[in-house]
Amino acid sequence: MTEQKAPSLVLTGSTGYLGKQVLAALKATNVKVESFSFSKFLRGAAEPAALRRLQQADVVCHLAGIHPHQPITPSENLYWEVNVVGTKKLLTAAQNAGRIVFASSAMAAGGKTQPGPNQGLLAYANSKRAAEALVVECAGINASSLSLRFQAIAGAHREPCVGLIGNALRAAREGTPLTIFRQAPPREYLHVADAASAIVAACLAPVEGHSVIDIGTGFPQHVSTVVQTVERVTGVEIQKHSVRSRTEPAPQTSDLLAARTLLRWQACRSGLTRIIIDQWEDQQHRATISIPTGAGLIP
């Protein structure tokens, strides 16, 4: 990649929550970006022209995959088949790419595991960690690879009822109890706009070799702090219902040195209050426009 010639870039997951933001941000730069359907590819239904673009791309940015917020809870096998086996298939097809950018998760860092009844988050973390190893292996010695370990992404346009912030906002809006897992570890929250800017930087920055880079704020937030902030933003006191802890990797605090030195990136919009305000205002707007003409607003 040189300054004289803009790189050609293939993006998977462009219709997802983060992908839509990344696609818009990339199109605002001097980059020829093409969306690539990972689901069609896994089914063997990718169009020949799309496969050629994948094989000829300077940069392959892989955001697509199975995550814990699917409408139906994924099985451990599905995590592995899509996030690991599927990623290896994609990387093999894109073996001529000069750079691979992979959207990973802070959960992949490992560390202590919080015991509980649900193994889904642990399976997800394991699949992301295995995919990171494949990214290095398949990129080879003549290409660079960057795996970005994202903290919890939130903000405007987030699907309702995703994560603690989404569920707390729903509880505030509907007056329903908020389920809180006992001894839930504190988490960092990252604005989707900051996450998208990190992806763009990873695609375009003059970085060599293979790196795993934390993308976050460095400031974990306790559950109580998140809920109190939601209450302050919405003006609603939320009912809480405490339940047994679930099995999940305790996320490690982001080490942001690599993000700053390699990508020249830092979070600009990821203050907890800013994230919650953006997500709340967006949900209020969407609820308003979805109501039929003549219907009253939900209090």
Image (cartoon, grey):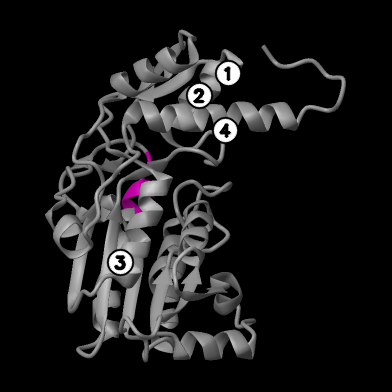
The structure residue drawn at horizontal position 55% and vertical position 24%, both measured from the top left corner, is 170
Mark toward the start of the polypeptide (4 vs 2): 2
Which residue is more in the foreground, 76 or 26?
26
Dots 2, 1 in contact, CB < 8 A: yes
The structure residue drawn at horizontal position 17% and vertical position 64%, both measured from the top left corner, is 262
Which residue reaches farthest front?
Answer: 4
Mark toward the start of the polypeptide (3 vs 4): 3
- Please give the residue where the numbered disc 3 appears in the rendered image: 202
Nearer to us of marks 2 and 3 is 3
- Please give the residue where the numbered disc 2 appears in the rendered image: 169
Q: How far apart are marks 2 and 3 (CA)?
A: 32 Å
- Residues shaded magenta: 118-124
Q: Which amino acid does label 2 sit on?
A: Leu
Dots 1, 3 in contact, CB < 8 A: no
- Please give the residue where the numbered disc 4 appears in the rendered image: 282
The structure residue drawn at horizontal position 42% and vertical position 57%, both measured from the top left corner, is 76
Secondary structure state at the residue bearing disc 3: helix
Where does the image place residue 148, in percent across and percent down from the top left?
Answer: 28, 60
Which residue is more in the foreground, 53 or 68?
53
Q: Residues within 10 Å of mark 3 (few under 14, many from 20)?
A: many
Nearer to us of marks 1 and 3 is 3
Q: What residue type is labelled 3?
A: Ala
Q: How far apart are marks 1 and 3 (CA)?
A: 37 Å
Secondary structure state at the residue bearing disc 2: helix
The structure residue drawn at horizontal position 46% and vertical position 10%, both measured from the top left corner, is 239
Mark toward the start of the polypeptide (2 vs 3): 2
